Image (spheres, rainbow, N blue to C red):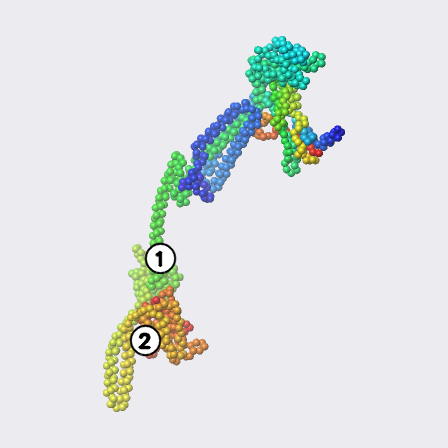
Amino acid sequence: MLKRALACATLLLAIQVFVHAAQAIQVTPLVRDGRVYVSFRLSDAFDNEEIRAAIHSGMTITFVYDVELRRAAAVWLDRTLESSTVSAGVRYDNLARRYQVTLSADGRLESSRTLEREDLARESLTRFDRLDLFSSARLEPNAEYYVRVRARTTPRNTAFVWPWQGTDVAGLAKFTFLR
Amino acid sequence: MATTLRDVRPPALTETPPPLPHAPARRPFRDNPRLILLGILVLLVALVAMVTLADRAPDFNPNFLTEVLLYALSVADLTMLLALGFVLARNIVKLLVERRHGLPFSRFRAKLVGAMLGLTIIPALLVLLVGSELIRSSMQKWVSQPADALLTSARQIAHEYYREREDEVVQHAGAIARAVPPSLVRDGAADAIRRTLEAHASAGPGRKVEVYRLTPESTPVLLASVQPAAGGTEPHPPGEVLASRVIRGSGNTAHEPLAGGGELVQAGALIVEPGSNLPVGVVVASEQVTGAVATETRNVIAAYQSYTRSLVLRRPLQGMYLSLFVMMTLMILVSATWMGLYLAKRITRPVQMLAQGAREIGAGHLDHRIEPETRDEFGSLIEAFNSMAGEVAAGQRTLERSRLDLERKNLELEERRRYIETVLERIATGVVSIGADGRIQTVNGAALRLLDVDRSIVGTAAEQVFAREDLQALGGLVRQAYAGSGHAANEVTMARDGRELHLASAATALQREDGNVEGAVLVFDDVTPLIRTQRVAAWRDVARRLAHEIKNPLTPIQLCAERMQRHFTTAPPAARELVDECTSTIVGEVESLKGLVDEFAHFARMPAPKAVPEDLHLMLTDALALYNGLFHNIRIERRFDESLPPVRIDIEQLRRVVINLVDNAVEALGGGSAPAHTANGGPTIMVETRHDPAQGVARILVADNGPGISAADRDKLFMPYYSTKRRGSGLGLAIVRRIIVEHGGSIEVHDNQPKGTRFVIELPL
């Protein structure tokens, strides 16, 4: 038991997590038991009046998170080892004033909940803990990797002239895989 | 060959390959009415699609609107912008190239396109700016404070109404949960429970009530259910899901819209043991909120959501409308540009085709025609051009025929001129023409030979040429022709290589019809052989008469002398001796005169040669054999040309010629008293033959290295009765010449090199 606790502590200490305070998404990767667990949190999502208005308009608003496990390259583009898409959709019932939140990963429906409180709904849409997304089998020992999460909402509240403007927010966290 | 727009190319460019003979010419888009109509139809469809799109945009799925449609419109706008830029850039480049090559109407076309763009771009941009501002302002006006407040209040009312109904159902479910004994639920007494439910049915009319029992695994199992007959328009769905949520504590209410309108409201309540508060079952009450109020409630919510959705999607919608507006503006600009180009082409192309056609005609392609593409004034102009080109081609063909005739006549004239020139060159008569400027224009070969000049005299003043001493007589003849009646003739004698040359000459002034003299022609013929022949004939006549007149009295003289000699045989010795001496002298001289007369007679009556092909070398060998051993100090050498063919000769007469010449040579070398041969040579006679196939003659050369003959004697050498020998009759070489002449040949005498005399006989082959 003690050994296991020490191993976990060592592993946790070895993971270097860089969460920038200014980042909109705080990402926390965790490697354990051959899996890479990812926790991330989107800050200030519901403080955006546009998002709140969009949700309260009764439209289905989906928060789409593209989670990528990547390895930095010195002279070339970083290599994406694995990727996954996590979606959290919310539909607000103006009559009952309830939030119906649906979670899915890579197209698979994971859960569907009806919430009456906005803070709970926001929590459900923006906070994800220890999502089992990737395998650590392909990771090389003592190599540095990072997990990048990019978030966007659909429908986009984009404008004319150049709809490709970057409205996505992103965050990443580096870690060294120790075995 | 016809000009189409494809033919209108900048000049001095590389030649375009001719079109394939059987490949049908593909009409460009702008000339194809079907394609133009199709293009207009596509534009109209695009416009209708845009209007429809703008009209139905608020109803589109927001994701489709923002994730697909907006991107597609932006891509379409960018594409059209690029197309417009490409068309403009292409035409600017074309304009620059055409101006550089000086192609006509390039500036006009640029101006027309510029005018069309100017006329459309300013209004289009103004419309775009005003329209976008209108869209923006109208979008802003979507936010209406009264409407916002009204819809918010309506939504609040609807929510309160719904909450009230929901609270009633919750209370009803709670009341039933309290009324149903937990023991019945635990025991599964469904009938007893149903009776309890029927007893409370009046508290919630139209409500369905279900009672679930909890299994040990906390799973709800339906025990009893009561639904009044007038409980709603649709069957109630089972409340098992809500029961589970109630058991889990994750909510006690649920609702969902009904297909026929209205709302299904469900509420659940736990049935707990009174003492332990442990749940044993769940009561789920369901009520269909239907009727006008429920429908209006839902409508209010729908209106509110539509309103707020419009506000939320205001920016994408505004973007879409603006995108459509930009698209229309770009379509107008592209259309205006294309229309400008089209009009410019329509106007300038016929003129360019005419210019190109004129260039083709100018380049000599008279069969070039322009294909008329329209029936308007330009078409008439092109038809007139084609008509003109046809007439020019016909005229050109006539001219070409005339030119060919002239060329043929020139060729004939040239042929004739060459023929005359050849004749002039070949004839033995010398011809010299003198131009109006007094310079010699032409001179033929015979003239060159007779006058002993070369062709460099052509272009030289005649006065200068004829100033030479031996030619002054000819110059005088020309002057007489100029000065007199235009013609002057005379026999001119001149010395040539120590011999006399007799020329029968005539000069004629060339007078034009107007009397002006444009030159003169001098003709002269070598009549020296004729003169010689005449002289020989005269001598022959003289010889014949002389022989006749002399020979007749010789016999009586001789007889008289013999008679005198016989008569004085008895005279005294002194007298007899004198008579004998005198008569012997007389008889001897008479004999000598007889021999002379015989020779004269022979000269006068020499028979015509009987020429047959003979071996000249054999004749020469026989003739020279006569001298073998006669003159030991004189060497007679032979040098025969083995290629010499048989020659037509009278062998006896030719033998006499050769013997005569060799005799003369032997005598010139001293005869029997010739000096002996030394290391430096000695008296030698060379007899040589030569074959000249080019001139068709055989030559016999007899040369000696004796003292030679002076130039003064050389010309008289062949004259009868001329002899440099003390005892010669002077007929030997005259006979030789006569024999050679009667063989059709000639004989000439030259100095031998380094000394001596050389006779050259030419006999025709």
Say which quarter of the image contains residue A97. Answer: top right
Q: Quadrant of the N terminus of chain A?
A: top right
Where B438 falls versus B674 (above or below)?
above
**Foreground residue, B328 or A36?**
A36
x then y, percent, for residue B117: 49, 32
Classify mark 2: residues with Cα within 10 Å, few (<14), some (14-19) or many (20+): some
Q: Return the residue at label 2.
A: B730
What residue is drawn where x is 48% and y is 34%? B114
So how many labels did they put on this image? 2
**Foreground residue, B656 or B216?**
B216
Q: Amino acid at mark 1?
A: Arg
Where B169 falls versus B615 (above or below)?
above
Q: Amino acid at mark 2?
A: Gly
Mark number displayed over residue B580 = none
What residue is drawn where x is 53% and y is 32%? B79
For residue B640, side relative to residue A29 (left or right): left
What residue is drawn where x is 49% and y is 37%? B91
Q: Return the residue at label 1.
A: B418
x then y, percent, for residue B554: 25, 80
**Foreground residue, B682 or B139?**
B682
Q: Quadrant of the C terminus of chain A?
A: top right
Q: Are marks 2 and 1 in contact (CB under 8 Å)?
A: no
Q: Disc 1 is attached to a residue of which chain?
A: B
User: What is the C-alpha distance between the residues marked 2 and 1?
Assistant: 48 Å
Say which quarter of the image contains residue B163. Answer: top right
x then y, percent, for residue A8: 73, 30
x then y, percent, for residue B692: 38, 66
Where A120 falls versus B175 (above or below)?
below
